[in-house]
Amino acid sequence: MKPTIVFCLFLVTSLLFAQNPADVKFQDASPKGAPASMSVKYDPDVGLYAAVRNTSGKGILAFFAILEPTDSLGRSVPCHSRADFIFKDSVLAPQAERPACPIDTSISPSEPGATVVKAVGAVLWVQFEDGSTWGDSESGKQILSIRSRKLAFLQKLVAEYYDNGETSFKAMLNDRNLDPRIWAVAGCLVEDAKSQKVPAINLAKNRLEAAQKWELLLAPF
């Protein structure tokens, strides 16, 4: 069965344009020797998007990538993709790919973008499943520096379900007043639970267990 593409990695709702990847002049500006690459893809549910492919021989645990699409009016809306598979179901396996950013210049439903004519993307940092890293360390800090807070939130979220019930759990899960980087964990749970048709608490427990195992392997976050 074809997997549902959910852009919970960056939590942006893309406005669909009936464009073909061939219509977009795309440049992968990833540094020479990068263990991952970027390319343009299309899905009828989400439209055009940039995907990151693992071109190395090791599983990728996290990556930081950027994309800058430009539309026919000359407008650009950069996207930063901070993917951390510690809080997902599995790493990005060799030769596998993952959606990173929508190729879209829309700012909001009331401010739609025009047809995208070109885009530049780059993978700037990667952490492998053995804990080693490649690339720009400052880019990596944007992911690594927030891990412990994400883990603490996930622990608190699961505890909330058992201490105060499902209603309180759902309220915490949908609290948009959280730091957007922390809320990304909750947002992914909500979207993935819907697409997989499973209770969000089940996913939360599984992801907490997986994250705690990674913490033991990689030393404290």
Image (spheres, helix red, strand yellow):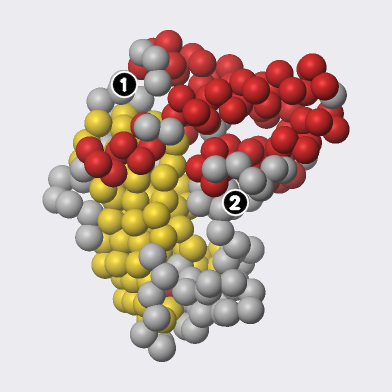
Residue 123 appears in the picture as rendered? yes
Q: Above or below — where is 212 with respect to 32?
A: above
Q: Above or below — where is 134 with respect to 12?
A: above
Decide which of 8, 51 is in the foreground and name it: 8
Decide which of 160, 99 is in the foreground and name it: 160
Q: Classify the position of the C terminus by image quarter.
A: top left
Q: Position of residue 203 (x, y in %)?
A: 67, 29
- Residue at the image position 62 percent from the left and 21 percent from the top: 155
Q: Above or below — where is 112 with respect to 38?
A: below
Residue 130: mark in rendering: 1
Disc 2 residue type?
Answer: Val
- In the structure shown, which secondary structural element does the residue marked by tag 2 occupy? loop
Give the class, few, some or many, for how many residues have Cα within 10 Å of label 1's Cα (few <14, many ≥20): few
- Residue at the image position 51 percent from the left and 16 percent from the top: 212
Quarter where residue 91 is shown: top left
Pointer 1 or 2: first along the chain? 2
Position of residue 89 in the picture relative to residue 175 (left or right)? left
Q: Position of residue 102 (x, y in %)?
A: 49, 63
User: In this figure, which residue is indicated by the disc labeled 2?
Assistant: 6
Disc 1 residue type?
Answer: Asp
- Residue at the image position 68 percent from the left and 26 percent from the top: 157
